Amino acid sequence: MELENKLNEFLADLNIFYRKLQNYHWNIEGKDFFQVHAKLEELYDEINEQIDEIAEHIATLGTMKDYLEKSSIKEAENKKIKSEEIYNNILSDYEELLKKTIEIKEKSENEKEYSTSSLIDDYIKEYGKIIWMLKSVKS
């Protein structure tokens, strides 16, 4: 049951984060507009694929629940925003996603739910890489 809740929370976070990345994509301004605009589209397309994959996995486990109210990621305001603020915001969101995926990995291993454990491995690796890249931008 705890693993099911963690998966549903993760799905909620992915959905809110997807919309947040789109919002930033539409509202980015500044001299690095083209570069950040394109990167944000790449990121939200990737998150959209993850939403589908996680939702389908949850469905195979038979544990899909109302999930959006469970998100720990906050929506973005619909306002113009500079890339530095975007990087700071999505860095903390990716750190939250990494934390959640590690919790899911640990719970799935403890519950011997190996299909979930295996699925989460790539997310842990990917989020770690994106966090490293976002921290490099800030240097």
Image (cartoon, helix red, strand yellow):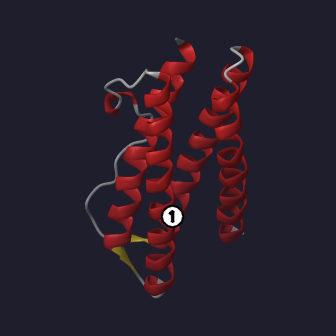
Q: Is residue 94 left or right of residue 53?
A: right
Q: Quadrant of the C terminus?
A: bottom right
Relative image position of residue 85 (x, y in whole percent) = 48, 63
Q: Does residue 39 lie above or below 98 as drawn?
A: below
Q: Say which amino acid is labelled 1.
A: Leu
Determine the residue positioned at 50% across, 39% down.
54
Determine the residue positioned at 55% across, 14% down.
2
Instruction: For label 1, count other residues whose C-alpha is less than 10 Å away and answer few (under 14), some (14-19) or many (20+).
Output: some
> In this figure, what is the number of numbered marks?
1
As drawn, the residue found furthest toward the front would be 60
Q: Is residue 126 left or right of residue 20?
A: right
Q: Is residue 71 left or right of residue 125?
A: left
Q: Secondary structure at mark 1?
A: helix
Q: Does residue 96 lie above or below 6 as drawn?
A: below
Given residues 43 and 25, the one toward you in this image is 43
Determine the residue positioned at 45% across, 86% down.
34
As drawn, the residue found furthest toward the left would be 78
Given residues 62 and 9, the one toward you in this image is 62
Relative image position of residue 80 (x, y in whole percent) = 31, 70
Q: Does residue 128 lie above or below 135 as drawn?
A: above
Determine the residue positioned at 53% across, 47% down.
93
Relative image position of residue 95 (x, y in whole percent) = 62, 45
Relative image position of residue 133 (x, y in whole percent) = 69, 65
Residue identifier under label 1: 43
Please identify the quarter of the rendering in which residue 16 is found: top left
